[in-house]
Image (cartoon, rainbow, N blue to C red):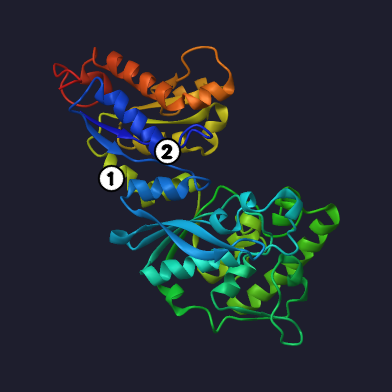
Amino acid sequence: MKLVLAPDSFKESMTAQEAVEAMSRGVRAVFPDAELVAAPMADGGEGTTAALTAALGGELVTAAAHDALGRPITATYGYVADERLAVVEVAAAAGIDLVAPAERDPLRTSTAGVGQMLLDALDRGARRLVVGLGGSVTNDGGAGMLQALGVRLLDADGAELPPGGGALARLADIDATGLDPRLAALDVEIASDVTNPLCGPEGASAVFGPQKGATPKMVAELDRALGVFAEAVSSATGRDVADRAGAGAAGGLGAAFLAFFDARLRPGVDVVMTAARLEERMAGADLVLTGEGGVDAQTLLGKTPFGVARAASRHGVPVIAFAGHVGDGAELLYDNFFAAIVPIVRSVTDLPTALAQGQVNLERAVETVCRVLALRSTEAFGAGEASRPLSD
């Protein structure tokens, strides 16, 4: 019997890896000899580095970098030596959690730390890069990252621009001759579900700027500055990124990756599943177990369990989803590749208790499901002969 364990994190309760471990204990209690494929998942947001690195047997490494305000930090990213793959979350260096609310100022916050992480990955020998865009406190179009990688952003007098999105209003020329040449051979995939363009009413500044500390006046200033940046990028690279879907992700970091890296931007869960070779590892599986903190109608809009279920459906493998909370519209999942949706909370309780008991509850829920499955033949799950019990 082969099961693939591919959950996302259960936010504030357990990481994806911890969810895999809880699922494993639940399965082993009933099927001690089952073949278990551990595939912790993510959708490009928080937890992507840990999940994908664990799924591929890599390691978490650190790099000396700076946060969005230029303060020295130690940033963590994933590296899979056998794959020569680096897994980077921009929030590890330019994250909103690293800057106190009173300090947030998108006119001057910078993505330079992201570039420093990438340089460290190149020094380790990376030839592939998966980037999770999300959780940034910046709105500089990726200018700081580009400067850290050797690009010069110059004003009309030929002086280098200071950090921050506000300074881009004075941008007159981009000199990319100093861009680290190793980047030319780097295969880059961007994991992001954000489709906003760089500029305009649906752009990075207007939609995401306020949560990063931008006032209405600052939003207008930043949007104009990113417009200047987009024109300069087009002149320097021949690529028009102002209206590209996803260019506005992470305060415009999407634009920098699309223009200077020729990156591929895809839904986060698809990038993670591809990099983790999830479908390849599903071959011959009897069942896939997935889940996350909440499952409802929104799950069908690209959340991790739905991505996993779509992949499993291509191989004819049934999927069971586990959730801390099953919300409105969850029944729609039954018409979209899910065999069952199982809540893990055992009794009425308060949220802090439910979060604290998440791993135990998930383990018990999986064990209960496996005890039911043990009563059924494998014929019901599309694998093997009807006479062979599932526990064989």
First in sequence: mark 1 or mark 2?
2
Determine which residue is flagged by label 2: 16
Task: Say which quarter of the image contains residue 182.
Answer: bottom left
Is residue 138 visible to the viewer in this orientation of the structure? yes
Determine which residue is flagged by label 1: 280
Give the amino acid type for the residue marked by disc 1 in the picture: Glu
Which residue: 22% across, 23% down? 31
Residue 81 in the image: above or below residue 169: above
Which residue: 36% across, 29% down? 22
Left or right: 179, with 340 as reference point: right
Using the image as rendered, state which of residue 300 and residue 107 is in the foreground.
Answer: 107
Residue 385 x %, y %: 15, 22
Residue 195 in the image: above or below residue 296: below
Report crowding for label 2: few under 14, some 14 to 19, many 20 or more residues within 10 A (C-alpha): many
Numbered disc 2: secondary structure: helix
Numbered disc 1: secondary structure: helix
Residue 217 x %, y %: 85, 57
Query: Which quadrant is the N terminus positioned in?
Result: top left
Compute the Cα span from label 1 to label 2.
20 Å
